[in-house]
Amino acid sequence: QDQGTHLVAQYLTNSGLRPAVDFGYNWGLLGLLFGRLWFAAFGATPAACEAGLFVTAGLGVAWALARISARLKLDAPMMAIVFLTLPFAARFMPPSFAHGLEAALIANALAYQLEGRKSVALALATAALFARPAIGFFYGAWLLVLMARDLYRRGGFSIDDLKPLVPAITTGLGLALMLAVTYGPQSLMHTLIPTHGLANYRASHYGFFN
């Protein structure tokens, strides 16, 4: 729960060290890239760090909940419940940029799914893998199941039916290339398939079975 870890991580990467290769790092590289751009714009200070955490998780998730509430046309009592539970639904001070970005991406993906735009939701779930490779895997797989079910119900299959996958494929390839160039392919591989994170979680007795 040390919110200063991203300040340290930025120092280490600026020194030429590779995350998840030269120093321990359990999450995705997208949080590091966001931190690099954020600190370049606002300075590498504790205040800037906390502001960045607030923007990624707090405002990102709050915006998604506002979209979902508007789509569902909630009445006043239900809107009051959404407002009162907002501090619990949106972690305004998450442990890291990675956690905040993942929460914002997944929450907005749910909003797009509710609007019937599963292809955009899948693209955001794909992006979430580069922030924190956890929920995005399961949510993305579920979206693929739903999309396959829609195809089955329509009957028949054509090459045009693959078009909804293009945004997710483009997002995944674009982020993979950008992060590999920035931090190295080894860091990308170790963070996108988080074997080190899994080992650390097992050692800390985290998970359903521990």
Image: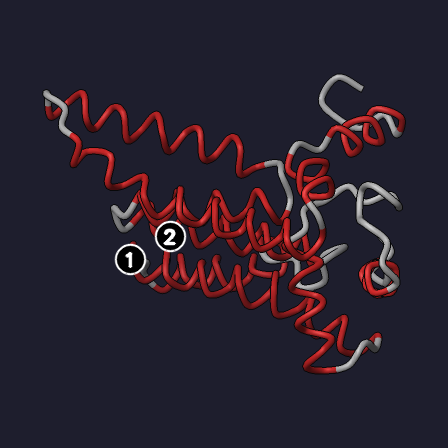
Check the image and name the residue furthest to the bottom. Answer: 42
Decide: is 116 above or below 45. Answer: above
Decide: is 144 above or below 45. Answer: above
- Residue 193 appears at what percent x and percent y? 66, 32
Nearer to us in this view, 163 or 68: 163
Tell me the CA gap for discs 2 and 1. 8 Å
Determine whether, in the image, residue 156 is placed left or right of residue 133: left
Considering the numbered disc 1 on the image, is that residue within a helix, a strand or a loop? helix
The residue carrying pointer 2 sits among few (fewer than 14), some (14 to 19) or many (20 or more) residues within 10 Å by Cα, namely many
- Residue 182 appears at what percent x and percent y? 67, 57
- Residue 177 appears at what percent x and percent y? 55, 50
The residue carrying pointer 1 sits among few (fewer than 14), some (14 to 19) or many (20 or more) residues within 10 Å by Cα, namely few
The amino acid marked with disc number 2 is Ala
Instruction: Find residue 156 and report its image quarter.
Output: top left
The residue labelled by disc 2 is 111
Q: Residue at x 85, y 31 (%)?
A: 200
Q: Earlier in the sequence, mark 2 or mark 1?
A: 1
The residue labelled by disc 1 is 71
The reply to whether discs 2 and 1 touch (Cβ–Cβ < 8 Å) is yes
The amino acid marked with disc number 1 is Arg
Determine whether, in the image, residue 29 is placed left or right of residue 123: right
Instruction: Find residue 186 and report its image quarter.
Output: top right
Check the image and name the residue furthest to the top. Answer: 209
Decide: is 208 above or below 25. Answer: above
Q: Residue at x 24, y 34 (%)?
A: 162
Nearer to us in this view, 149 or 126: 126
Q: Residue at x 46, y 65 (%)?
A: 63
Coloring applied to the structure: secondary structure
Considering the numbered disc 2 on the image, is that residue within a helix, a strand or a loop? helix
Determine whether, in the image, residue 59 is placed left or right of residue 47: left
